[in-house]
Amino acid sequence: MLSNAMEIGKRLKEAKDLLPHGEWGKWLVESVSYSQRTANRLMQLFEEYGDKLFASGDDSGSSNSSAHKLCTNHIDVT
């Protein structure tokens, strides 16, 4: 589940980077069901911990557990 949140954060960041300045909020409303706050938190989660999770290349539960331990107390994505 944590890796899914990070993947969503990664994709949201990629989408935001492609949009002209000032269009992010409008795109969120039209394209996804996340509030701007939730989208920002998902992107923050990816920016802070995504490299650590994806660098392991391990899709087993152990990498998720490690990443979960790293960020559980730092970011509330709800």
Image (tube, rainbow, N blue to C red):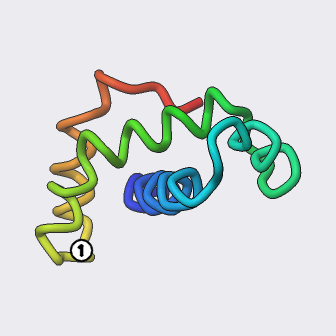
Asked if 44 appears above or below 59 in the picture, the reply is: above
Q: Extreme right residue here?
A: 30
Residue 63, image x, y percentages: 18, 62
Q: Which residue is mark 1?
A: 60
**In the image, residue 35 above or below residue 58:** above
How many numbered discs sit on the rendered protein? 1
Q: Residue at x 24, y 74 (%)?
A: 60
Pick the front one: 51 or 13: 13
Residue 38 placement, left or right of 49 = right
- Please give the name of the residue rendered at 22% of the width and 67% of the height, measured from the top-left corner: 54
Identity of the residue drawn at 35% across and 48% down: 46
Asked if residue 64 lies left or right of residue 17, the reply is left
Q: Residues within 10 Å of mark 1 (few under 14, many from 20)?
A: few
Picture coordinates of residue 62 (x, y %)?
17, 63
Q: Nearer the viewer, residue 36 or 75?
A: 36
State the residue lying farthest toward the front: 20
Q: Is residue 5 left or right of residue 29?
A: left
* Viewer-nearest residue: 20 or 16: 20
Q: The disc labelled 1 sits on which kind of residue?
A: Ser
Image quadrant in which the C terminus is located = top right
Image location of residue 47, percent across then percent down: 31, 44
Identify the residue at horizontal 69%, vertical 36% (top origin). 22
Find numbered disc 1 in the image and state the secondary structure of the residue it sits on: loop
Which quarter of the figure has residue 48? top left
